[in-house]
Image (tube, helix red, strand yellow):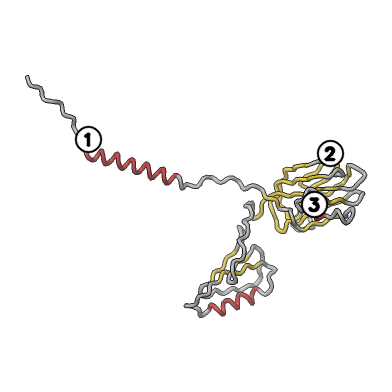
Amino acid sequence: MYAHPRLHRPLPASRGRRSGALAVIAGLVLSLLAFVPQSSASAAPSLLSQGKAVTSSSQENDGTPASAAVDGNNATRWSSAFSDPQWIKVDLGATASVSQIVLRWEAAYSKAYRIEFSSDNSSWSTSYSTTTSPGGTETLNVSGSARYVRLTGTARATGYGHSLWEFQVFGTTGGGDPQIPGGGDLGPNVLVFDPSTPNIQGKVDEIFEKQESAQFGTDRYALMFKPGTYSNINAQIGFYTSIAGLGLKP
């Protein structure tokens, strides 16, 4: 008896198309996942104190100024007069979130001292204190907001003064985000103001007079205002002029 050969039924065309479509979708999903932003790590603290304005209660001699403790050079130092108490204070230039302080003591260190924070150089709060400092290099994990950071030595470990190779303050500015490095000269038509800029009103009026009827002109102006308080500034905006507040809290 003749047997018919067994025939394999071809897959429906729709199933083949479906498989192909699924493969394409899977590929698209994987591609899109590559663009999904990953959760960002918290910003690493920056060295805020180096090169900043610094003052002290005293100095041993002309070769041991307060500025030597923030110059980034471990071969220069600040040393106070041979008495207690003594202090050294650094102005960070702006309020910062301070997270760490590194003290690189010379042999004549402070056995007892405190670290103080202030936002106005008048009211101070103690962030850290000790009466048993070991000297050497101390790394202090602190927390607080400050523009001014002061170390007050209340008891010397030796008969000499309070002496630091480096007084380093680490943290972040701008509400916790790291400072963005400057980009150099932005050109004559980008003006960056802060509250201390003289004659802001006169400058914005001058630009408006140029731009008021410059519908087909070529000049472009950008007016940028740093965080701060600006009283009674009336900035009228003409053609091709943009105005923006800078920072997280403009």
Q: Earlier in the sequence, mark 3 or mark 2?
A: 3
Badge nearest the viewer, 1 or 3: 3
Density class for disc 2 (Cα within 10 Å; few <14, some 14-19, many ≥20) is: few
Element type where label 2 sits in the image:
loop
Badge nearest the viewer, 3 or 2: 3
Q: Is 122 above or below relative to 203?
A: above
Quadrant location, the C terminus: bottom right
Marking on residue 69? 3
Q: Is 133 above or below relative to 202?
A: above
Q: Is 214 above or below relative to 97?
A: below
Question: Who is closer to the viewer here, 214 or 78?
Answer: 78
Density class for disc 1 (Cα within 10 Å; few <14, some 14-19, many ≥20) is: few
Which residue position is annotated with label 2?
132
**Disc 3 vs disc 2: Cβ atoms closer than 8 Å?**
no
The spot of residue 212 in percent (x, y) is 53, 79
**Disc 1 vs disc 2: Cβ atoms closer than 8 Å?**
no
Question: Who is closer to the viewer here, 187 or 161?
Answer: 187
Q: Spatial distance from mark 1 to mark 3, Cα to Cα?
A: 80 Å
The spot of residue 152 in percent (x, y) is 83, 49
Dot 1 amino acid type:
Leu
In the rendered view, does 243 fall on the left or right side of 65?
A: left
Number of numbered discs: 3
Element type where label 3 sits in the image:
helix
Element type where label 1 sits in the image:
loop
Q: Residue at x 34, y 40 (%)?
A: 23
Which residue position is annotated with label 1?
11
Q: Spatial distance from mark 3 to mark 2, Cα to Cα?
A: 22 Å
Q: In which quarter of the image is residue 199?
A: bottom right
Residue at the left extreme? 1
Density class for disc 3 (Cα within 10 Å; few <14, some 14-19, many ≥20) is: many
In the rendered view, does 73 fall on the left or right side of 19?
A: right
Q: Spatial distance from mark 1 to mark 2, Cα to Cα?
A: 83 Å
